[in-house]
Amino acid sequence: MSADPNTKPELIPAVNEYAPKEVGELDLYQKREKIYTRSIEGFFQRIRLFTGWPLLAGFFLLPWTRWHGHQTVLFDLPARKFYIFDLVFWPQDLVMLAWLLIICAFGLFLFTSLFGRIWCGYSCPQTVWTSIFMWMEQKAEGSRNQRIKLDQAPWSTAKVLRKTLKHGMWFGFAFLTGFTFVGYFTPIIDLTFDFFSGNAAGPAYVWIGIFTALTYLNAGWMREQVCLYMCPYARFQSAMFDRDTLIVTYDRKRGEPRGSRRVNNGEKPEGLGDCIDCQLCVQVCPTGIDIRNGLQYECINCALCVDACNSVMKKIGYAPDLICYSTENRMEGKPTRILRFRTIGYGAVMLVMCSMLLAALVFRETTDLKVLRERSSLYQLKDGHIENIYTLKLGNRDNSSRVYTLNTDLPGSQWDGPTTITVESGEVASIPVRLSVPEIEWGGRNIEMHFSACLVDETTHCVHHESRFTGPVR
Ligand code: SF4
Ligand code: SF4
């Protein structure tokens, strides 16, 4: 077939693939939209109350309680001693702190892979403190609509008074938080007297000021910004998620197509899903997201949207749980598995670490013995004897005073120094000791020997430290 000579050949449009494409203007700094959350009540909010209040009460009351003569929990940095109930930790025990942190990390991994960000939604201090600050805001400035109106209104006496009341309450609570936090590091009763009489140490005022300011900023002003931009957990938690992880999710099949409607005893209009597009789930969300857009890293699993949507469903006579806690597998009608490779792995690591920590706590050595030799001379010859001088450093890391007997395994030696000593809790005693052996029995070679300190009430329990006895070499 030949081409018609009168027909113009079809032109192939030439596109320069390398030419710069037209792009929209990108704003690298996203301006923060202020979130006005609506308060809501419901089943999951009651659970949040039960988890939040014990945490708050524990935080504020614990430093005021005493346990066997000391503050129940005290991280005494100047004395380098940490008291937690009956346990006293020293710098030597820092390895246990490392284990504890690893256990907490794996606990968080395990809980995240099973229950998603349940920690963020219910127990994270940022969430709990932000909820309290929001509650104060509501008391001072009113409901969501009243707060929006107040912010848009010009400045007036009423506005100044409401804002002052809100910031006064925020500041008061932030100060209480900062003061209590420092009370975990300085005996809080002394701190209270010294602080209000102006006699506290300078750093105490500085640290209380810093923690007050941080609480005020984080819970009052920054709120969800801390979760979105500052908390590393929000970023890496998705690595622990899988299709069996519990998440807050919107039942798209049931809810779509969404649309407003005239509600009539739970009857549904043709062609519409269950979502009436009331936006209540968005208005209650503390991070300002719309859960109907799917799983988002901003979601802290707080279930405020679940309570909000359930209240709507109840009002219009539809079945609850259009938004609910579920797993991706369950939403697709597949079974949800609790035992998975990752949950078994995290659980196993936690179990091993917990057992090791428990064993380390039970068999923890509470006596330290170190031996320092006299530096100025290796030995002295005195009255037909060879004499070596030592300083024994005996530390008691128990929470009560202990009596020790001191001894050596150097054969035929004479001991010149205390053989029994009481060491107070947390003290390190310095004990000078002279050991001598008759020159006539001296074999001409240095001798490796040990010092020992034995508890008088538990004589089977001794600690040893190796040392050396020196004399003239023959
Ligand atoms: S609260 Fe429920 S019904 Fe209202 S918009 Fe959200 S999902 Fe739809
Ligand atoms: S989407 Fe729902 S669960 Fe997630 S943060 Fe918002 S209110 Fe909380």
Image: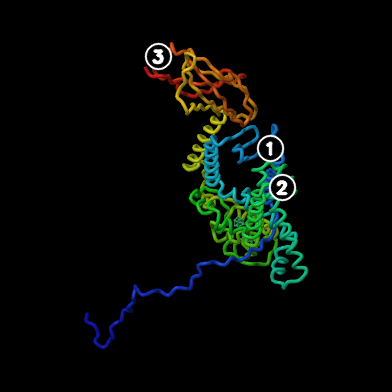
Residue at x-position 55% and y-position 42%: 104
Single out the mark in the foreground, 1 or 3.
3
Q: Is mark 3 within 8 Å of ligand 2?
A: no
| Above-or-below relation of 440 to 313 | above
Determine whether the residue tagged by mark 2 lies in a helix, strand or loop. loop
**Mark 2 and mark 1: span between their CA atoms?**
21 Å
- The answer to which of 260 and 293 lies nearer the viewer is 293
Q: Where ligand 2 lies, by image quadrant?
A: bottom right
Quarter of image, res 230 = bottom right
Amino acid marked by disc 2: Asn
Quadrant for the C terminus in the image: top left
Q: Amino acid at mark 3?
A: Gly
Choose between 383 and 335: the one closer to the eye.
383
Q: Which residue is mark 1?
A: 71
| Pointer 3 residue | 443
Whether the residues at callouts 1 and 3 have beta carbons within 8 Å, the answer is: no
Residue 17 in picture, x, y percent from top left: 34, 73
